[in-house]
Structure formats: structure tokens, C-alpha cells
Image (cartoon, rainbow, N blue to C red):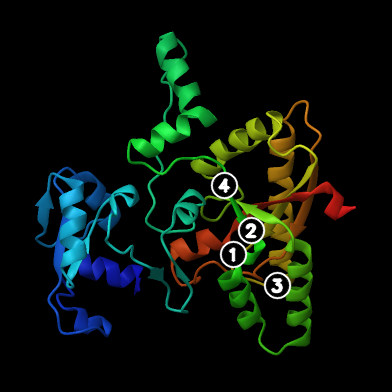
Amino acid sequence: MVTLGQLTALLSGEIQSWSRLGGDSVPISLHAPQSWDGEIRRLNGSTKLAEAILHEDLTELADNVADDVGALGLMPFSALGNAVPLVISGACGLATPATRDTIRAEDYPITHPIFLSRKGVDQPKIVRDFIVFARSPAAQDVIRAAGFVDQAIGRVGFERQGDRIANAVLAAGSDPAEIKDVQSMIATLLNAERLTLTFRFRDGSSELDLQSQSNIQRLADAISRGEFENQQIMFVGFSDGVGPKDGNIRLSDRRARAVRRAVAARVSGSNTDFDVAAFGELMPMACDDTPWGGRVNRRVEVWVKPLEITR
């Protein structure tokens, strides 16, 4: 488990032994795909990448990392093989593992969404059809087979939220009012499932980022197809920990209501109930000490439960 700052130091060669991070005195060997120069620069910013062993074959890369106790590899999640994905944490101790669900929800910091867009309006029909297909449920198996994390909308049950609930309980401490708020949140989300589709916002604004703007239509399409028939969809707002608690609750409520309106405006012919809840800074996903951590915490999650439970 490393912080983003430590990861930068690892990639730049500033840290050359795992002993600097509390591990054994083993030198670090960096591995990367032959064709990833652009991706590495995007990940590591202006910091120069340390000398790395480059691989044309991703299976070979993963095998080398798995067999070398001192290795650190950069590779697509789908090519992990027997290698172990890196857990990213913040200075406050909150950590996010790399899983297909955390990547889909953009909870994991090292994600890179790929967008397909048309330039102009007079594109060939085959281009328009391909973009429509890429967003369809039928395309998601193809996307996975091509080595990418697909955008199928998955569900994560409440029973799998243990670490996040524990973070909320720990943050509440012994304050009776905070504990009561946590209990209220748990009661609201109990028996519900979180969708692997999250809405996040540009820094310092209530404007959705590009991925979240796309998620509006993805969710509306799924609802219109009847995937959530006779279920309640809750848009649950959260914030970072900056500013007063009451203000953060109001802000997370406004954002949740804005997302609900945007989705509902694009839905047609569905017997789906919509609701809103807001809990401000109550369940942090990451530490607020980095720009990424604050962005991850400023979010609207989507939870679903059968209508009979809500009545």
C-alpha cells in the first residue's frame, strides 16, 4: 500500500528500495509496456520516469512482476495475471484497492476513461453506429475481451460496504450526534445495492466531469430498458470534509437533486421510483489532503432497492 506521492517517487526513481516504505531491503525494478510512453507521462506528470524494463507482451510483463519480489509494474487491470494490484492510500490512512468495481466507479485513483466522440455532425453512418454499439450492453463483453474495463452497470451489495461503513464509524468517534448520523445513513442504505456508476464534479464547481456527463445517459438508457423496473433508485450525495458540516450536507443534497433531475429528464416509459438522500462528509472514500482525494469524496452515488422494501 502506497500513497500517490510515494508512487510518484517510485516511478521517478527517487525511491529505489522497498525499505524506504517499510518493506524489506529489496531494490525496486520497474516494468512497463513498450507502447506506454504517453500513458506514463500522463500518470507521472512532468516527473521523469526512472529507467524501466519494457515489454512488448503484457503476459510476459505480468509474469515478470509476479515472479520478482522487488518488481513494480504498470499494466492494464485486465492483464494482471498473477501480479497483485497496488492499493493506493492517503496520509489519513483511507485506502482504495484496485478492483473492476472500483475502476468502473472511478474510486481507484489510477483510472483513465476512454471516450468516443464524433467531430462535427456529418460523420459516416458506420462511425455513428459504432459509437452507439460501444455504449450498448452487448458491447461490454467485447470491451472486456479487448483488455479494457467495461462500462456495464454492476451492483455492490450493502454487505460488501464494510470498509466504507467502518470509515464512517471511525470518523464519527464518540460524538453522539455524529454516531446518530451514521446510524441514519446505515438505516437508509441497508438492504440496498450501490451501482458501479458514480457522478463526480469538476474541481471547485457543481459541474459534472466528462465521465459523469456520459453516466447520465448511461443510467437513463438502462432505466428506460427496464433494468430497474419496480425498484427505487436513490441518488445519494456526499462531500469532502472542507467547510462546515451543515453546508456540506446542503451542497451534497443540491448535487444529488441535480443528478436526479438530469437522469429523470432522459427516462421514458419506466415504472421506477426516484429518491434523494444526502450525508455530506459522513462517508469519506479518500483523504482530503490531495486534489484527487477531495474529488473522489465529492460525489453522488446511485443505490437501488426493491420498491416493496421502501413501502
Instruction: Check disc 4: other Cα within 10 Å, few if <14, some if 14-19, many if 20+.
Output: some
Find numbered disc 1 in the image and state the secondary structure of the residue it sits on: helix
The answer to whether the residue labelled 3 contacts the one labelled 4, judged by CB atoms less than 8 Å apart, is: no
Is the residue under label 1 in contact with that under label 2 (CB below 8 Å)? yes
> Under tag 3, what secondary structure?
helix
For the residue pair 156 and 219, the one nearer the viewer reads as 156
- Amino acid under label 2? Gly
Question: What percent of the width, then of the height, locates residue 63?
Answer: 18, 57
Classify residue 279 as left or right of residue 283: right
Q: What is the CA distance from the residue labelled 3 to the residue labelled 1?
A: 27 Å
Q: Earlier in the sequence, mark 3 or mark 1?
A: 1
The numbered mark, 4 or 1, whose residue comes first in the sequence reads 4
* CB under 8 Å between discs 2 and 3: no
**Which residue does the image show at 14% across and 75% down from the upper left?**
16
Residue where numbered disc 2 is placed: 157
Image location (x, y in percent) of residue 92: 47, 79
For disc 1, the marked residue is 160
Crowd rating for badge 3 (residues with CA inside 10 Å; few <14, some 14–19, many 20+):
some
Q: Give the amino acid at mark 3.
A: Lys
